[in-house]
Image (tube, rainbow, N blue to C red):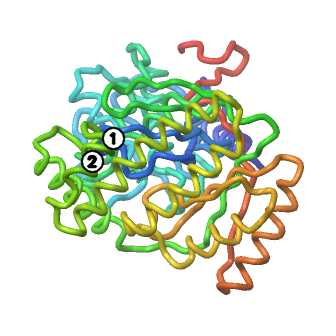
Amino acid sequence: MTPLEKVQARFRIEFGEAPAAIVRAPGRVNLIGEHTDYNDGFVFPLAIDRAAWIALRPRADSCVRVISLDMDDDQSFNLNDLPRPDATRWIDYIIGVAWALQRGGYRLAGWEGVLAGDVPIGSGLSSSAALELAAARAFYCVSDFDWDAAQMAQIGRAAENEWLGIQTGIMDQMISAAGVAGRALLIDCRSLESTPAPLPADTSIVILDTGTRRGLVGSAYNERRRQCEAAARHFGIAALRDIDLATFANRASELAPVIRRRARHVISENERTLQARAAMLAGDAEALGELMIASHTSLRDDFEVSSPALDAIVNCANAEPSCYGARLTGAGFGGCAVALVRRDAAEDFVRKVGAGYASATGNTPALYVTRASAGATTMQLGAPENTRL
Ligand code: GLA
């Protein structure tokens, strides 16, 4: 059963009627532009065809009750008395979204419903952002406010950063909120403007999950952020977005070697990300693939966020003639890579790379061809998509 079928079926059993609305918010894979978002730079993700789904109906009181099918758990809270986070349970993401919305002056109504998803948790495909944006969309359905994708992305990020204390940039929430079907989205993480771009014709996007997870991602991520901030401070700029490669090359020797490498990654990655847009608009899969390969090298050598498993799966992918380019995606250290592949060879690519990587590393990978889907949406049964309750 799909998550959509699951939430519908359980809703009927639990509440004795069809849900008033079903909301969906997707996970993401980033094509290029890694560790640039918290430097006010550019990212180029797409919303994937895996998502968090909530079937819901409004409540007359200020209570929110959610049954999570994946966690086999049933939790409630009162909007007038939000319980503080407790070791980051799944419900804390929803409470955090309620907190951020209320802090932003949004007046919220209660609801109850059933949650399920198929974004693998902890694999680097942004299951958290999907949950945050699905929760925001659920509140939007039952309350009286307008949906602004960039604002809702900021709400999701505030929930994660400030309520839960987990540091992230804005990329994951932006793409989950603003994704466009069939398109990747170039996002300017300073202005939050986003520009859709078509993927090159006759290509497929393949997600390559290494099957590895690393526990210390959080502390290494925060360390990278501090290093980038130190470099920006040194140059007297607001963020590494504000310096180009030529200026940086002239002054790079002023920085300590580690900080220099971190800054070089971010500054060159911003340039690659803008070049990627030109490649996409020209339909040039080869140029886009080259940029992805250069991005991985920079992440591996300068930013040092790859891992033996990620390098192994990226190497296996790049060795296939049908692959234009592959790179790690997301924070790094484990989780997933992404590859741009000739569409007619995608199934063959998945089989060969899966087998090659498994025998080289002994890990169990998961590879799947994905499609660019839309950002957070509401389905109202029997009514056109995105109608309000
Ligand atoms: C994680 C964060 C994002 C971004 C990436 C790296 O996915 O949540 O905001 O910083 O790492 O590009």
Distance, label 2 to label 1, CA atoms, is: 6 Å
Residue at label 1?
A: 157
Relative horizontal placement of residue 89, taking residue 312 as reference (left or right): left
Give the vertical position of 3 relative to 255 (above or below): above
Q: Is residue 63 visible?
A: yes
Residue at label 2?
A: 161
Place of residue 291 in the rendered image (x, y in percent of width and height, measured from the top left): 56, 49
Place of residue 201 in the rendered image (x, y in percent of width and height, measured from the top left): 78, 34
Q: In the rendered structure, which amino acid carries the disc numbered 2? A: Asn
The structure residue drawn at horizontal position 56% and vertical position 45%, both measured from the top left corner, is 27
State if disc 1 and disc 2 touch (CB < 8 Å).
Answer: yes
Relative horizontal placement of residue 243, taking residue 354 as reference (left or right): left
Give the vertical position of 308 relative to 324 (above or below): below
Total count of labels: 2
The structure residue drawn at horizontal position 38% and vertical position 69%, both measured from the top left corner, is 304
Question: Which disc is residue 322 wearing?
Answer: none
Residue in front for this viewpoint, 261 or 168: 261
